[in-house]
Amino acid sequence: EDEVWQVIIGARVEMTSKQQEYLKLETTWMTAVSLSEMAAEAAYQTGADQASITARNHIQ
C-alpha cells in the first residue's frame, strides 16, 4: 500500500512541475505575441504598411 501512495505522490509532484512549466511557456508565448503585435503596429504607424501586413499575417 505504501508503494502505491509513493507512486501517487510522485505523479502529483511531476504533474505540478509540468503545470508550472506549461504556465511559464504560455506566459513566454503571450509575451512574444504581444511584442510582435506592437512591432506590427509600430511598422504601420511609421508607414511601413507591407511590413505590418506581413507581420500580422504571420501572427495569425
Image (cartoon, rainbow, N blue to C red):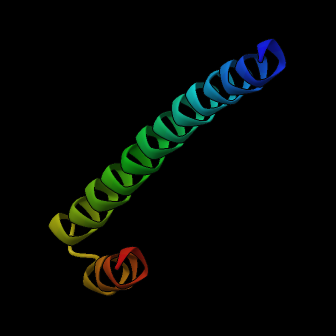
Query: Which quadrant holds residue 39?
Result: bottom left
Q: Quadrant of the N terminus?
A: top right
Q: Position of residue 57 (x, y in %)?
A: 35, 85
Work out whether residue 38 or residue 11 is closer to the camera in this orientation and state it.
11
Q: Position of residue 26 (x, y in %)?
A: 45, 45
Answer above or below: position of 22 versus 17: below
Left or right of 55: which side holds 52?
A: left
**Residue drawn where x is 25% and y is 82% of the image:** 49
27 left or right of 44 in image: right
Judge left or right: residue 24 versus residue 9.
left
Q: Which residue is at the front of the view, 6 or 51?
A: 6
Q: Quadrant of residue 5?
A: top right
What residue do we see at 21% from left, 74% from top? 47
Q: Residue at x 53, y 41 (%)?
A: 22
Q: Residue furthest front?
A: 1
Instruction: Return the residue found at the far right.
Output: 3
Q: Position of residue 7 (x, y in %)?
A: 77, 26
User: x%, y% of residue 6?
Assistant: 77, 17
